Amino acid sequence: MPVDCLTMDRTVDLAASVLAGNVAHSIVAVNPEKVMRAHYDPKLREQLQRAGILIPDGIGVVVAARILGLGRFERVPGSELMPRLCELAARTGRRVFLFGAAPDVNVRAAQVLQTRYRGLTIAGTQHGFLKDADMPGLIGRINASQADILFVALGSPKQEDWIDRYLPQLNVKICQGVGGTFDVIAGRVRRAPAAFRAVHLEWLYRLVSNPRRLLRQTALPRFAFHVLKQRVMG
């Protein structure tokens, strides 16, 4: 499972270079849960391998890379990268499009972003409750909006599948899968307090806040087991 050796600042600089070029890049988050799912899902694994930029979203990925001697880099949370890209877009006159989440969340997220980043142009919005038959029309709207950056909030692995399938038809420069970030921006979901984030325990806060995530979080010990097994075996 590939992941790019990045820091937040380096990722933003890379995004600025992509915006100045002519090749579309997808940005996909890599975390232990996704690595384990890709381990057993060849379709997801192939989609991730085709992604343009794979950010180390989970601290487990960062620690695993160090344990295995694969490189030293920092965590780049997708939920923090999106605001940084909006800030970059506002500063450079780039246009963004928001696709995904519930209708009210989508609208509210656009309002908050425009208030927070003065000069940001929201080229268009679309909630995530669309059928496959509606996708050609959506692709047409996104291209007609002349958006430079497209944020896709459909949750994983649905958003990875959507990006892999439709990015070749889009004229955007950057397409980032952002999961539930619209809900956080809109104020629907509260992010972990700074104290939890500082010690990389945001996953624990989310689990305590939403026990239904327990089944998904079982990927963490399995991921740790595989990493340690690989380390012992050299």
Image (tube, helix red, strand yellow):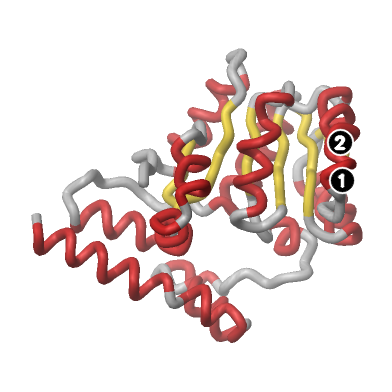
Q: Residue at x 55, y 29 (%)?
A: 15
On screen, residue 123 versus residue 18, left or right, reads right
Pinpoint residue 187: horizontal percent, then vertical percent.
77, 67
Who is closer to the viewer here, 186 or 198? 186
Which kind of residue does numbered mark 1 sit on?
Answer: Gln
Q: Badge 1 is on which residue? A: 126
Who is closer to the viewer here, 109 or 112? 109
Q: Badge 2 is on which residue? A: 138
Q: Is residue 213 visible?
A: yes
Who is closer to the viewer here, 59 or 100? 100
- Above or below, 142 against 195 in this view is above
Pinpoint residue 96: horizontal percent, then vertical percent.
77, 34
Which kind of residue does numbered mark 2 sit on?
Answer: Leu
Q: Residue at x 68, y 60 (%)?
A: 180
On screen, residue 77 versus residue 59, left or right, reads right
Secondary structure state at the residue bearing disc 1:
strand
Q: Residue at x 66, y 36 (%)?
A: 165
- Above or below, 141 against 82 in this view is above
Classify the position of the C terminus by image quarter: bottom left
